[in-house]
Image (cartoon, rainbow, N blue to C red):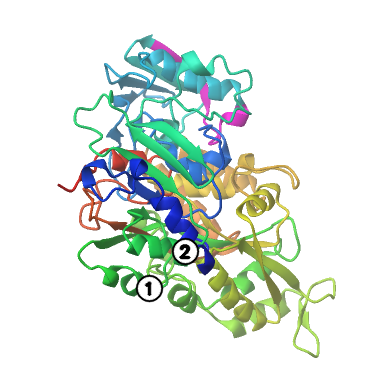
Amino acid sequence: MRVAATLATVAAATLIITGCSASGASSSSSSRYINVFSGNPGNLTDNFNPFVSDVAYGANGAVLGAVYEPLFYFNSAKNEKPHPWLGTEYTVSPDGLTYSVTLKDGVKWQDGKPFTAADVAYTYNLLKEKPALNLYGLKIAEAKAVDDTHVTITLTQPDYPNEYRLLGLTFIVPEHIWKSIPDPEKTTNQKPIGTGAFSFGQFTPQSVTLTANKSYYEKGEPAIPGIRLVTSTGNAAALNSLNAGQIDWAGIALQDVQKSFVDKDPKHNKYTSIPADIKALLPNLTKAPFNDVEFRKALSLSIDRDSIIKQAFGGTDTPGNPTSLLQPRDEAYIPAAYKGKTLDQNVDEAKKILTGAGYSYNGSGDLLGKDGKPVAFKITTVTGYTDTITANQLLVQDFAKIGVKATPEELSLGAYSTERQNGTFDLLDDRIPTGPNPFQQFSDSLDSAKTAPVGKPANANFVRFNDPGVDKLIAEAGSTNDPAKLTAAYQGLGTYFAENQPYIILSQNGAVTTYRDQYFTGMPTTDNLWATPSNWLSGNIGYVAKSLKPVK
């Protein structure tokens, strides 16, 4: 959902998209590839290993679900049962340890080899044997093929709320190819072979083409000839290409989506906006003063979130609940004390908290830390992320109201990711991702097992949070399917979050997905969210694109 902001790349981006009629530039709907911009700035990398974070969380993750497929599709826009994909149905043993999955029959890999339960078992056992590939910390004991269309996946402990990742984000790979890869953790998998509706075509640093899999197991799918994942280095470049009909589907953070996009072509320009996750500041909890809960509370109170939502986030975001639970989806889990609550600005109260906690002010109005030195730090985002760049400019002004000097910093996406993973930042402007339930956001943001010492890469919990009591609540949420126990665990986690603010919430991300229906029909709409339209979530592009139809 991110974009860069350099006007000079408009012409370059247009050439990238229109350079070859065979891969998408033709105006004929029947031969036109769907051109997708996932919102990640800069060049693509020639790496399609579905088990490494740079792919799963990066621009190339958009390929996952198009070439590779998981067992089921989880629609995070709705609270509903998962949709069949490679799997048709599954049951869970009473103790929550064993998942018995029935697979679709007649599926083939894109190289013509048969897909069987042995491939599924191999994939999950690979994650067990190679912890570095187990991005989501799946608690796999073993996986076994019962026969060609039935597989069992056994866990070391119940993990009910993590079904989304277990069944919906684990992309199945072919055993006959991967068993010959000497080092799966390091392979870049440049010619991926999956079961998906689209086969890998061609890679350049500016685009990846995927072609329709003519042998796909679902009759009539895909109806479109292919997908082209394109890059852009500028908000203006991507928006210009979108409005010109050269991009069909994009995740662009726009300050006024109606004026800058919809009004340009009301007949074809459409968008959806759904509460997707939480935009938040990530404080490095290993550093003072961020390791002080009173400082974090004061910093939070200094923020004018209404202005940030309007001026930086395009007015499509909504105020977040102090618990970090999404509204209205997670309303049942919000503790009574926090129902309907938002985070408001109160500079006087912030100063009172600071002085009461041992901070002081010098004659110039600068806040002095407990070491007697002025409080100063960097607030970092990615070069060209126009929404967070604007937000950080506003935050610098807000923090100055309590005597704090914040310096905005922009890094390349690669440098930003490295600092985030290694814990070498001060304060990041980022997000807390979620799934179809609150488990992922609490697990990713607060589970101490998912972090790492400063200087070593973490796949989640980048702030280096560690609290045994919170770990216990996460474990309780993950080990039960009892609604009352699950609610109690989520309420406990939400209450802790609100009282301690280990992350500083900015807003509820009203994730905007822009698309044009001039050449294709069938996109999820606000009135019919049959799938999640966000094209920066791994799996969504493939699942949605295989159902699209060319306009005749």
Q: Residue at x 85, y 75 (%)?
A: 372
Quick check: 505 left or right of 463?
left
Q: Which residues are magenta?
A: 131-145
Q: Is residue 451 visible?
A: yes
- For residue 10, the mark is 2
Q: Position of residue 293 (x, y in %)?
A: 66, 64
Q: Nearer the viewer, residue 529 or 372?
A: 529
Q: Nearer the viewer, residue 149 or 27?
A: 27
Which SS class for mark 1?
loop
Quick check: 103 left or right of 357?
left
Q: Nearer the viewer, mark 2 or mark 1?
A: 2
Q: Looking at the image, is mark 2 or mark 1 earlier in the sequence? A: 2
**Quadrant position of residue 335:** bottom left
Which SS class for mark 2?
helix
Q: Is residue 381 magenta?
A: no
Q: Residue at x 31, y 58 (%)?
A: 245
Q: Position of residue 17 (x, y in %)?
A: 41, 51
Q: Which residue is the site of mark 1?
A: 256
Q: Position of residue 409 (x, y in %)?
A: 67, 66
User: Residue flagged by tag 2: what amino acid is it?
Assistant: Val
Q: Is residue 2 visible?
A: no
Q: Quadrant of the N terminus?
A: bottom left
Label 1 near label 2: C-beta < 8 Å? no
Q: Nearer the viewer, residue 478 or 151?
A: 151
Q: Nearer the viewer, residue 356 or 58?
A: 58
Q: Residue at x 22, y 42 (%)?
A: 30
